[in-house]
Image (spheres, rainbow, N blue to C red):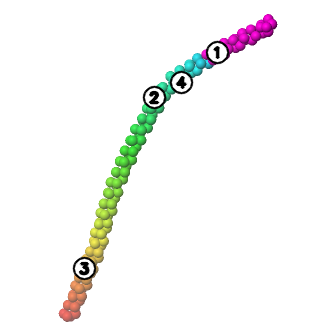
């Protein structure tokens, strides 16, 4: 082989080796940067993951508490319904007594009116017989 061709091949080989070395250094730097970024992410994500777990626990607790409160509201609502039914019955009974009272009042008024009428009638007949 000619020395000129050998020199070109040697130069090309040296250029290829230099390019591979530069590429390896660049890949190494990129890997170091990626490792640094991953380290930062890991440092930042750990507290976030812990906070997320704490928030989820709080949400579960609040959900359980809300469910208990809804059950209590249901119980109170049932009691209110029972009391309302009882009050309805009492009001119905009282209105029945009021009607009975009204009827008795009217009956007593009629009796008194009849008594007065009969008394006056009897008094009037007595006046005619004595007169």
**Which of the marked residues, 1 or 3, is nearer the chain's N terminus?**
1
> In the rendered image of this protein, does residue 120 appear above or below residue 64?
below
**Is residue 82 highlighted in magenta?**
no
Q: In which quarter of the view is residue 100 placed?
A: bottom left
Residue at numbered disc 2:
50
Could you give the CA–CA distance between mark 3 and mark 4, rounded to whole angstroms?
Answer: 102 Å
Could you give the CA–CA distance between mark 1 and mark 3, rounded to whole angstroms?
Answer: 125 Å
The crowding category of the residue bearing disc 4, from other C-alpha atoms within 10 Å (few below 14, some 14 to 19, many at least 20), is few
Q: Residue 41 carries which label?
A: 4
Asked if residue 75 can be seen in this view, the reply is yes
Residue at numbered disc 3:
112
Residue furthest to the front in view is: 1
**Which of the marked residues, 1 or 4, is nearer the chain's N terminus?**
1
In the image, which residues are magenta?
A: 1-29
Q: Residue 125 location, x and y as percent?
A: 22, 91
Question: Which element carries disc 1, helix, strand or loop?
Answer: helix
| Marks 1 and 2 close (CB-CB < 8 Å) | no
Q: State which mark lies toward you, 3 or 4.
A: 4
Q: In this view of the protein, which residue sits in the foreground, 12 or 43?
A: 12
């Amino acid at each position: 082989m000619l020395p000129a061709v050998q020199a070109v091949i040697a130069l090309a080989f040296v250029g290829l080796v230099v390019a591979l070395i530069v590429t390896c250094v660049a890949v190494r730097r990129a890997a170091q940067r990626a490792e640094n970024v991953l380290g930062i992410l890991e440092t930042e994500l750990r507290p976030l993951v812990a906070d997320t777990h704490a928030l989820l626990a709080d949400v579960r607790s609040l959900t359980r508490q809300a469910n208990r409160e809804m059950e209590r509201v249901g119980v109170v609502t049932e009691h209110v319904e029972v009391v309302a039914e009882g009050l309805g019955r009492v009001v119905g009974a009282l209105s029945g007594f009021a009607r009975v009272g009204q009827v008795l009042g009217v009956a007593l008024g009629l009796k008194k009116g009849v008594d007065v009428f009969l008394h006056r009638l009897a008094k009037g007949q007595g006046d005619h017989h004595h007169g």
